[in-house]
């Protein structure tokens, strides 16, 4: 059961990180281009 909870937390962290990258990447490209 504990392993499933850890997996769920990791998935959430990955999703949040992916969303953050998707938001900041266009801005970063705009700034540095």
Image (tube, rainbow, N blue to C red):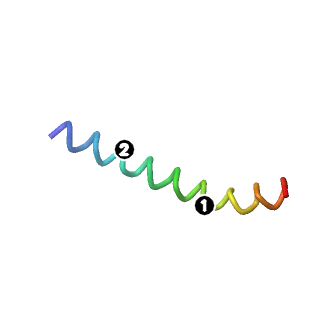
- Counting from the top left corner in percent of width and height, residue 26 is at 71, 63
- Residue 12 is left or right of residue 3, and the answer is right
SS class, disc 2: helix
- In the rendered image, the vertical position of residue 29 relative to residue 10, given as above or below: below
Measure how far apart labels 1 and 2 are at the Cα level.
18 Å
Query: How many numbered circles are shown?
Result: 2
In depth, the one of 5 and 15 nearer the eye is 15
Q: Quadrant of the N terminus?
A: top left
Q: Which mark is residue 10?
A: 2
In depth, the one of 23 and 31 nearer the eye is 31
Residue found 25% across the figure and 43% down from its top: 5
Residue at label 1? 22
Residue found 36% across the figure and 44% down from its top: 10
Residue found 60% across the figure and 54% down from its top: 21
- Counting from the top left corner in percent of width and height, residue 29 is at 76, 58
- Residue 32 is left or right of residue 17, and the answer is right
SS class, disc 1: helix
- Counting from the top left corner in percent of width and height, residue 12 is at 40, 51
State yes or no: discs 1 and 2 in contact (Cβ < 8 Å).
Answer: no
Residue found 50% across the figure and 53% down from its top: 16
Q: Quadrant of the C terminus?
A: bottom right
- Counting from the top left corner in percent of width and height, residue 20 is at 59, 55
């Amino acid at each position: 059961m504990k392993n499933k909870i850890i997996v769920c937390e990791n998935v959430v962290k990955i999703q949040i990180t992916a969303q953050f990258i998707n938001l900041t990447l266009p801005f970063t490209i705009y700034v540095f281009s």
